Image: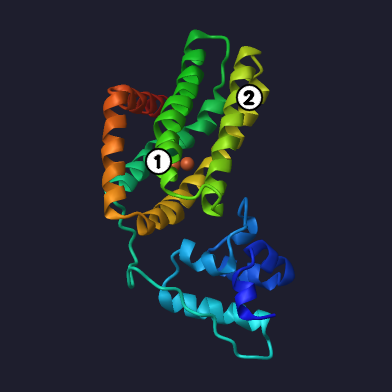
């Protein structure tokens, strides 16, 4: 089969045919085998992960070696907009979302203590869990995920795998939240703890995907005008939410002093 045919194949399909490629990608910290979708085309994998030029040459040579062990076939190199950029430089709207992740990660770090101290009977216990649910629904979901889904994603084709992976994670998270609310209603501590744990396990990887892959990829593909539009929209959203994000920050700080 020609090289073009492989470049246009989904990475999962390529891995199924050549399992060794999954191990190679893992060595370069490109976890296609464990990715929720894994439907990115082989030719897009290096672009989405923004692999350095020299690393790309080496990686593609190794992949080529697996597919064509008897021939020396070179994959065509992708065109680069920015040469040799190592450190991620975010545009102002992306930077804002990266900063919001920091507070979400602080909440995630508190979840084991929240689970250990779960109390659905006392006023204080309910204050902690209701505050946590309020943070998840209003800060992490409405305030933050809405910026991603309602504003940023509209500049991109929603059928792109990279967008689908992120949206699927949001759906999974929302389903856990629904189950948490039901468990609180039924005073079912065990189920609540299970869903809090599952939620806290999805988000660190999700945030890493956004910080290291999605946002830099979006920045590379948005025009200066679009970034400007996003920035004004985000400022509007911040004005609309007023003091709410600060209230959420105070909640996290209070929990940190309680549990840490
Ligand atoms: Fe997200
Ligand atoms: Fe996010």
* Residue at horizontal 39 percent and vertical 37 percent from the top: 147
Asked if residue 249 can be seen in this view, the reply is: yes
Give residue 35's quadrant in the image: bottom right
Q: Nearer the viewer, residue 259 or 133?
A: 133
Q: Residue furthest bottom?
A: 71
Q: How far across and down, in percent of the image, does residue 51 sit?
A: 45, 69
Q: Residues within 10 Å of mark 2 (few under 14, many from 20)?
A: some
Q: Disc 1 beta carbon < 8 A from ligand 2? A: yes
Decide if residue 129 is on the left or right side of residue 19. left
* Residue at horizontal 45 percent and vertical 56 percent from the top: 213
* Residue at horizontal 59 percent and vertical 64 percent from the top: 41
Decide if residue 113 is on the left or right side of residue 2. left
Asked if residue 260 can be seen in this view, the reply is: no
Determine which residue is flagged by label 2. 179
Q: Residues within 10 Å of mark 1 (few under 14, many from 20)?
A: many
Q: How far across and down, in percent of the image, does residue 72 sit?
A: 60, 90
- Residue 45 vertical position relative to residue 250 in the rendered view, above or below: below
Quadrant location of the N terminus in the rendered image? bottom right
Q: CA distance from mark 2 to mark 1?
A: 23 Å
Quadrant location of the C terminus in the rendered image? top left
Mark 1 falls on what kind of element? helix
Decide if residue 95 is on the left or right side of residue 140. left
Determine which residue is flagged by label 1. 101
Which numbered tag is attached to residue 20?
A: none
Mark 2 falls on what kind of element? helix
Q: Nearer the viewer, residue 150 or 165?
A: 150
* Pointer 2 or 1: first along the chain: 1
């Amino acid at each position: 089969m020609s090289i073009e045919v492989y470049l246009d194949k989904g990475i999962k399909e390529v891995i199924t045919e050549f399992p060794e490629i999954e191990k190679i990608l893992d060595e370069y910290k490109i976890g296609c085998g464990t990715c929720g979708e894994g439907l990115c085309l082989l030719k897009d994998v290096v672009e989405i992960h923004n692999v350095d030029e020299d690393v790309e040459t080496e990686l593609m040579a190794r992949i080529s070696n697996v597919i064509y062990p008897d021939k020396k076939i070179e994959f065509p190199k992708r065109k680069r907009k920015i040469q040799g950029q190592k450190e991620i430089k975010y545009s102002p709207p992306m930077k804002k979302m990266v900063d919001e992740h920091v507070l979400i990660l602080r909440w995630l770090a508190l979840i084991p203590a929240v689970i250990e101290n779960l109390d659905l009977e006392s006023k204080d216990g309910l204050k902690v869990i209701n505050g946590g649910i309020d943070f998840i629904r209003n800060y992490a979901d409405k305030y933050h995920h809405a910026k991603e889904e309602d504003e940023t994603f509209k500049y991109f084709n929603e059928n792109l795998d990279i967008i689908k992976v992120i949206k699927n994670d949001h759906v999974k998270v929302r389903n856990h939240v629904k189950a948490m609310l039901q468990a609180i209603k039924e005073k079912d501590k065990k189920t609540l703890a299970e869903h809090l744990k599952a939620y806290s396990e999805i988000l660190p990887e999700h945030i890493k995907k956004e910080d290291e892959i999605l946002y830099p990829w979006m920045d590379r593909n948005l025009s200066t005008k679009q970034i400007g539009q996003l920035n004004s929209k985000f400022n509007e959203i911040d004005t609309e939410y007023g003091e709410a994000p600060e209230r959420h920050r105070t909640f996290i700080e209070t929990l940190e002093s309680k549990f840490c």
